[in-house]
Image: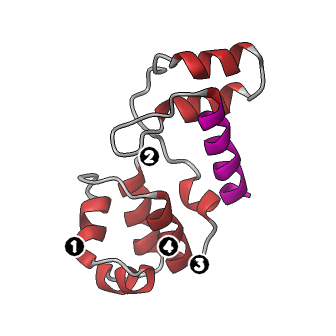
Amino acid sequence: MKLGERLKELRAERDLLQREVAAKAGISFTYLSTLECGIQSPTLKTMGALAHAYGITLKDLLTGVEFGPAAAPKLPAALRKLAAAEVLSPDWIECLARIEHNGRRPRTQAAYMDLYLHLNRVLK
């Protein structure tokens, strides 16, 4: 399931309007609509706000959500080194390989580890 579908599902389960969810999350209802339609992707901060608006954890919000294409992405050099060193699980390597911020990916092993540590804290 895509993130937009998950957001719609959560809203429908709770019988809420987009305006209600958006107000609770501190975003505009038009932005929520673009998220639900898959036109835009939310920031981690917005996903956290939406999870809070639904009364669930970020981990629960993302449970069952598929990101990106089904094929495994080509690993950047820094991430390949972490994978070879078996520092992170294959699931984390795959997850980190799909993350971009402002169209950019981390470039160093240290940057990937920082991202991993941040996500690990948020998801616990």
Residue located at (65% from left, 33% from top): 110
Amino acid on which the number 2 mark rests in the picture: Met
Nearer the camera: disc 1 or disc 2 = 1
Q: Which residues are magenta?
A: 110-124
Amino acid on which the number 4 mark rests in the picture: Ala
Nearer the camera: disc 2 or disc 3 = 3
Marks 1 and 4, Cα distance to the nearest angstrom? 16 Å
Q: Dot 3 corresponds to which residue?
A: 55
Q: Secondary structure at mark 2?
A: loop
Q: Nearer the viewer, residue 51 or 44?
A: 44
Marks 2 and 3, Cα distance to the nearest angstrom? 20 Å
Q: Position of residue 62 (x, y in %)?
A: 55, 54
Marks 1 and 3, Cα distance to the nearest angstrom? 21 Å
Specify which label sits upstream in the sequence, 4 or 3. Answer: 4
Q: Is residue 16 magenta?
A: no
Q: Name the side, left or right, on which 81 lies relative to 96.
A: right
| Image label count | 4
Marks 2 and 4, Cα distance to the nearest angstrom? 20 Å
Amino acid on which the number 1 mark rests in the picture: Thr
